Amino acid sequence: RIDDAGGAQPLAGLVEACTGLVRLQLGQIRLSALTMWRHRLPEALGGARKLRALTLCGNTDFSDEGAARVAAAIHGCWSLTELGMSFCGIGDHGAARIAEAPPACTALTRCTRLEAPVEP
């Protein structure tokens, strides 16, 4: 679990240190927008120039704010081809922010944002 108890800060350092990182899977670790911001994870992702696949699926507290932070971070990820954000609690506003990122991410060909069906 990566939360405010300190797990995200070492992760940001690892992402920065791994200059050849091509795939990062951070699914279902209870990552939130606030945790990402507090521990500089967006800045670390922005420096991952060789990153091809980023999976954040299943972090249900991510929200539109988290999507906006990811959109800002991936502007430097020119090699990114896959972005998985399924079941992250992202609404239309967050999805729009992600959709604005691809001009800088010319290799991005697959982005998922699926949400659980709403019960009537």
Image (cartoon, rainbow, N blue to C red):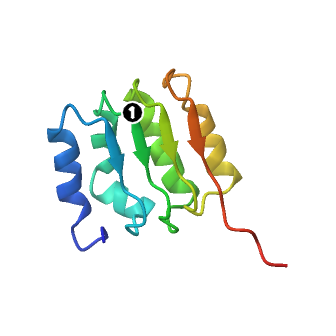
Q: Residue at x 17, y 48 (%)?
A: 14
Residue 98 relative to residue 75: left or right: right
Identified at 50% across, 64% down, the residue is 58
Residue 18 location (% of width, % of height): 17, 38
Which element type, helix, strand or loop, lies under badge 1?
loop
The residue located at (41%, 60%) in the rendering is 27
Quadrant of the rendering where the C terminus is positioned: bottom right
Classed neighbour count for the residue bearing mark 1: other residues with Cα under 10 Å, few (<14), some (14–19), many (≥20): some
Is the residue 120 above or below the residue 109 in the image?
below
Identity, as a three-letter code, of the amino acid under mark 1: Arg
Residue 49, relative to residue 29: is it above or below? above
Q: Which residue is mark 1?
A: 52
Percent x, y of residue 34: 40, 62
Q: Tell whether 93 sits left or right of 6.
A: right
Q: Residue furthest left?
A: 17
Q: Quadrant of residue 5?
A: bottom left
How many numbered badges does the structure rendering display? 1
The N terminus, quarter of image: bottom left
